[in-house]
Amino acid sequence: MTRTNRLEGFGFIAPLLVLMVVAFNAPIVYMLGLAFWEKGRGFTLEHYEGLAEAPVYLRVLGNTMRIALIATIANVLIGYPLAHWMRGLGRRGRMIALAMVVLPFWVSILVRTYAWIVVLGNGGLVNRALQWSGLTDAPVSFLYNELGVTIGMANVLLPFLVLPLFAAMIRIDDRLLQAAASLGAPPRTIFWKVYFPLTLPALAAGALLVFILCLGFYVTPAILGGGRVPMISNLLDTLINQIPRWEQASAISTILLIVTLAIFAAYRRLDRKASA
Amino acid sequence: MKRRTFVGAAAALPAVGLLSGTARAQVKEIRMIESGGKSGDSIEVGYIEPFTKKTGIKVIRESPNSLGKLRALVESGQTSTVLMELGSGTLVQARNLKLIEPIDWAAVNPAPMFPEARNEYGFGYQYFSTIMAWRAGAKAPKNWAEFFDTKAFPGKRCLPDFPHYSLPFAVMATGVPADKLFPLDVDAGFKKLNEIKKDIAVWWKAGAQPPQLMKDNEVQYVICWSGRVVGDPAFGCNFEGGMADLSYFSIVKGSKPEDRAAAYKLMYEMSLPANQAKAATVVSYTGPSPELDALLPKDKLSEFPSSKQNKAVQWFQNAEWWAANGEAVNKKWEAFKLGL
Amino acid sequence: MTREAIGGSPWTRRALAAMGIFGLVFLTVPLVIVIPMSFSSARALTFPPPSLSLRWYETFFGDPRWMEAMWTSAFVAAISSVAALILGGLAAYGLRRGTFRGRDWAEGNFMAPLIVPTIIVAIALYLALAKVGLLGSLLGLVVAHTLLNVPLVMMVLGVAIREFDQRIEQVAWSLGASWGYTMRKVVLPNLAPSVFAAWIFAFIGSFDEVIVTSFIAGKYETVPKKMFNELILEVNPTITAVATLLIAFTVLALAAVAFVLGRAGKLKETGV
């Protein structure tokens, strides 16, 4: 197959591209454009200046990124061992585990989030178990704080990390590891010097994806945060629905979008490396 | 000859126009956006049913409502939705943003109404109150100073995640009487909230949260909407110092004249005390008729926001002040929550 | 020279198993909670349920509004998931196999609905649909859901197409097969499990979409919109019954597909 045709394959993406541009790009650009426009006065940067003067909205954005980072790390700490363990299972074990990873998708995110209230509440399962076993004597606050939001988000987004990571891990040939062993390397070295570097691109790509999804999350922080965990989506909801200062919302969204796109570009590069 | 037929034809045109005009003005249905839930059901039962029976016009309800939706409706130039439910603060904002039209009260010709419900831009169809409530068995506070006293009244609080519902009560707790509340001493309010902030377990955004949290014993004291807690033996509540407020229906800007006429007829139905009494059986909020008290069940009078006894101890929300200062206060509110 | 040499001491392996099992438990806790709660007789969301009853299923099936929401959701999900699958699948194929310029830009654009905050998408679509008079219409909902689920489809199919050895296609072409034939007889059968997975993700994604739908659905109620409104207005275990029914439906669908594919021996070939 010669590769000189610069338009080769364009026809495949054309229908989706048309739909996207008309039904998505145009409206979004209009919304974001509001940040640069003042009715009657034309192009202006005063909405961004307003953000800089009263930086509380930017602080919420920073808060969101911090929480997203913590949730992503939690995902990695739980997800990597899970995927690695799944790799070591037999065919049947892998299928069952895979089903258990994927099945939560079928439960509505609203219901999943409310289930965590039942589990983590003051009178919930975890607290009851802790008190019954004598580990604590007063209920521990798992809910309506950052801890609850982190747990909830980690729970919802874990499959997004585990699935591609697992796919990358099973592509690592066992014979590679056996070769290293036969050369005298101890298991720890095999893992950290051979196995882990091979999984790193997929891990990084998955982590970035989870991070991006955390940034835009609305439902779980709204329900599990109890109003005490200010995140950017909930702030945007207030600015759009309650106040309504669409211009400010657009300015914040544009900043958020630029940050996210930069991270997404990094994700794409790592994703390509992972599949090489 | 040609000229006469032409003139004759030209003379006939307005007549045809008049005929087709009335034919066009035959409205079959109108659309409203309301807040949903039991409130929406009460509108259906109390007002839409008699309206449709009298006029044959259907009312299509849509929910939820928000100022954002109203702004999008008007900016996109649509004309299909004529009625929008708005809170008192959002009514003023919508008016300032020129998103709603003034009401032609002569055309509505309502039955007698409380004056505050007869707004230039909105029909106040529903009184609701924001009051203090507690889990049955907890020590009952008598006023706001006691409610905000976590030493004498220990327990977790759940407050509205809306400055216009929380700050005024905090300011009252510092000793300011209701008639001197506005202009609001916002800093005093934040100071009070900061004093007890580690005891505020949840800031609620959904009206269903406070009663649920009390039932789960996550919190013991809440500030919430009266309809959620009155008449329920699991809770105690107190209208003392509570904030009475109205929900309004407004006409969306750019509505068609025939839709507007139909909407006015619906508003007329909303002014009749008999209909309001029916609506009050679905949800414990009251309509704006002064004669409503007589029609409500006597033993339940204490549950209704605008019954004489409750009106006496409450104060009314100051929508104008919030419309002017809301955005600045909201910034302080976000900063306050970041420090939680 | 196998497990010990590579996997480390039995303690390391046991610790790994513990972490793995913890991960699975963590993931499935909501499932385990929700299903019994749907059979609870209590009015509030309590666990464990005080006693068993089918009242929430009765409430669900007996309420015409829930049934209508179910019908609307199923309709929109079915059409939008197929549309997302076709459009997204073609696009994924074009992106992987094509050589035209600006592929990265196109791909970024297609992923955008996942990245832009949903509330912004909601308002943008509200304005756009209102301008063309599609606000509160089923067509508008289908278009919105298609756009929102295309990124998921493209992610799943993108990986599958990349894994699929292009040389197999090239062999088919060099043997004289037309594009259509190659697609139908060579590519699609091999990608079948991924295609099905992508479709399921799109279907569930549409069924679960709440924020944009709350804005643009008008008088139409979908299952998640009704759930969200109920949770906002009145917490009610009917939603657990709905969730359980959805789980049951998809498990049955998956089992049916696995049975059919297993018979055809396809599962072995995917190497899971």
Image (cartoon, coloured by chain):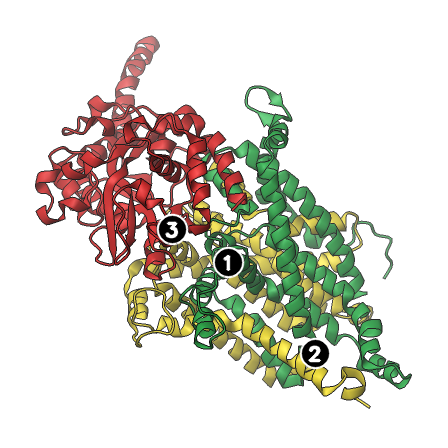
Q: Is residue B190 left or right of residue A33?
A: left
Percent position of residue C46, x then y:
36, 68
The chain containing the residue under callout 1 comes to: C
- Answer with left or right where residue A78 lies relative to residue C30: right
B114, above or below A94, in the image: above
Q: Residue furthest front?
A: B152
Q: Residue at x 61, y 80 (%)?
A: A95
Q: Secondary structure at mark 2?
A: helix
Picture colour for chain C = yellow
Give the distance between the C-alpha atoms of the residues marked 1 and 3, in whole angstroms: 37 Å
Quarter of the image with the N terminus of chain B is: top left
Give the letter of the red chain: B
Classed neighbour count for the residue bearing mark 2: other residues with Cα under 10 Å, few (<14), some (14–19), many (≥20):
many
**Chain ID, mark 2:** A
Q: Which residue is mark 3?
A: B157
Residue A108, image x and y in percent? 47, 63
Chain hosting mark 3: B
Q: CA distance from mark 1 to mark 2?
A: 31 Å
Q: Examine the rendered structure and indicate whether residue A253 appears above or below residue A276.
A: above
Question: What is the tally of numbered marks visible in this picture?
Answer: 3
Q: Inspect the image, locate mark 2, and give the three-letter code of the amino acid beneath it.
A: Arg
Give the letter of the green chain.
A
Q: Which residue is mark 2?
A: A87
For disc 1, the marked residue is C206
